Amino acid sequence: MKHVLLLIALLAFSVFAKDMQTAPGAYAIDLTRYDFIDTTLNVIQYPKGNAAFTPFFNKMDTLVFENRGQVRILHIGGSHLQADVISGRIREHFIKEYPGASAGRGFVFPYSAARTNTPASYASSYKGIWDMNKNVQREIKKPLGLLGIAVSTSDPRSEITLLLDKYNSEPIWGETKLRLFGYSDAGDVVPVLRVDSTDIYGTLDSASQSYVFTSPRPIDTIQIAFRWIDSLKQAEIAQFITDSLLQDSIARAIEDSLKKAKGDTTPIKVPEPAKIPNNVALPEVARDSMFQGECDVLDTTCLLREEAKNKARSCAERLNKPTVNYAEGELDSTNYANEHCITDTVAVPDSVKKNARPRFTLTGILTESNNPGITYTGVGINGAKVHDYFEEVCPLLEKQLAYYKPDLVIFAIGINDANVQHFNDKQFKDDYDKLIARIKNVNPNVAIIFETNNDMYRKVKKKRYVQHPNGDVARKAFFALADKHKAGVWDKFSIMGGLGSMAKWEKADLAKADKVHFKLSGYNLLGDLFYKAIIQSYQEHIANLPAEKRKE
């Protein structure tokens, strides 16, 4: 029976291989329209052979031919990955077309609560006031994990909601297990999962600072509320906030009405709203779409402004380094790693400060199911560089990754490292060595694919851009890393057309005017190309299976 399945798979792959100019199924794209794209290079290259991929391919075999087990893929990068368009496209291919089953959505996060763009593949909304810390900020105040981001709240009305199927024409996700990574300084707040208006309390795993939830039914909407141990205090403060907001809105309405009646803009004194006591935060309006936060998921001008703000000026003096105005296109002098300020002294927990309210910090949510299939997690923070995932910045990365334990990691970090005046490729490779060591601490047999940087231009004057040769330098560094770590390379830089090709992608309406990021159509095309390349590589593995069996 297994040999029959092998034959069917080979026949299916043969049909697929004959049509390498179009993406499979509903994702068909006529690549003949883009003669600047070199499709002959659209393969996974293995400088030292693909022996290191045997564990990954074997797990795929078990899933495909026996419908057993789960395969986990991690794709990690910067703004290309936070937008989750290219990675989202690859994910759709895997779970819809081959082998057609999902083992869960993987890691997700309420990015709207951090006032940044939620990945395009799902929506998030929130209630309450939250503060945020990201690994691209110079001053790191919270211990970060795999996702490189954390949000904290002491608002008694805080909630988060993730809508996993918000943008899917048909439901895809049905999660039954959730692991919420987060903590309360004094243990006086616990997260609860709300399913069908019922509060489900999780089991605390103190070793990993996480809460484990089991849903009574498969869900694609994740709603988390935060319950204080002192429920009376939580209800009292929440009611006070509600009353204060109502009184404030009435006062504003009276003021507006009186102004209109007078026909001028003279300030009118109205009754003062109730004064909010110390440590009582006002909840914000919930947001609900992928265009939440300060930036549209593909609004690159806004993303650049956000990136500039993330380079917090409070640390610039301590680093003795001038602040870069990224919004105007200025570049760092080098890609050296001394950009973060990490306080050596132990910070005073919010919960023990005078009159402090209970506070909870959330660093990520892992969603899973018991089904056999593929889980594909995309991790990215706008502006992230390789060293932004180091231990001093993201100390919880390995602890959280241990619960995901990827079989394949696709590294796509590098566009921000190379967007500098003097690119230090040795430093770049050394940084990657450190990050890879962290990943291999979790899974020594993990397969690795490096995704080379896309071609890009740098801004020298208003509306004037010049070619940026660092893309080719970084490309060679990626190949050197692949040679050292026995990894694969997907040479996006060369597939695009090499140096200067970004201008052609922009002219073809595939890239943004900043000549660094892509439009939706461009990201989708890249996702289609990568999926073809990885499936072709797996196809070659399958083609060799009968010979291997004969040797046994």
Image (spheres, rainbow, N blue to C red):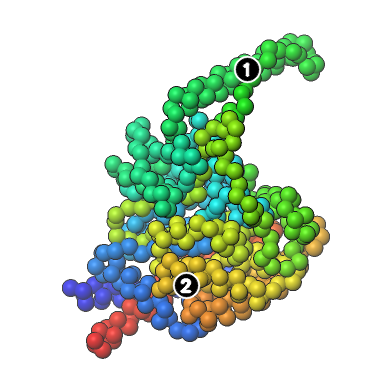
Say whether residue 305 is left or right of residue 1. Answer: right
Q: Secondary structure at mark 2?
A: strand
- Label of residue 86 in the image: none
Task: Estimate the x, y position of residue 153 in percent, counting from the top left.
Answer: 54, 38
Viewer-proximal residue, 187 or 494? 187
Question: Residue at horizontal 56%, vertical 73%?
Answer: 433
Q: Quick one: 53 or 527, which is closer to the camera?
A: 53
Q: Which residue is mark 2?
A: 448
User: Looking at numbered disc 1 in the image, what kind of residue is underneath it?
Assistant: Ala
Q: Which residue is mark 1?
A: 274
The image shows residue 521 at horizontal and vertical percentages of: 55, 58
Q: Where is residue 549 drawn, in percent x and y?
A: 25, 84
* Image quadrant in which the N terminus is located: bottom left
Q: Residue furthest left?
A: 1
Real-space Cα distance between discs 1 and 2?
A: 58 Å
The residue lying at 68 percent from left, 15 percent from top is 272
Q: Residue at horizontal 37%, vertical 77%?
A: 54
The vertical placement of 80 against 251, above or below, is below
Q: x, y (%) of residue 108?
A: 46, 50
Q: Quadrant of residue 199?
A: top left
| Numbered disc 1: secondary structure | loop
Crowdedness of circle 2 by 10 Å Cα count: few (<14), some, many (20+)? many
The amino acid type found where label 2 is placed reads Ile
| Horizontal relation, residue 509 to residue 126: left or right | right
User: 328 or 485, which lies in front?
Assistant: 485
Task: Give the mark toward the camera: 1 or 2.
Answer: 1
- Foreground: 368 or 403? 403
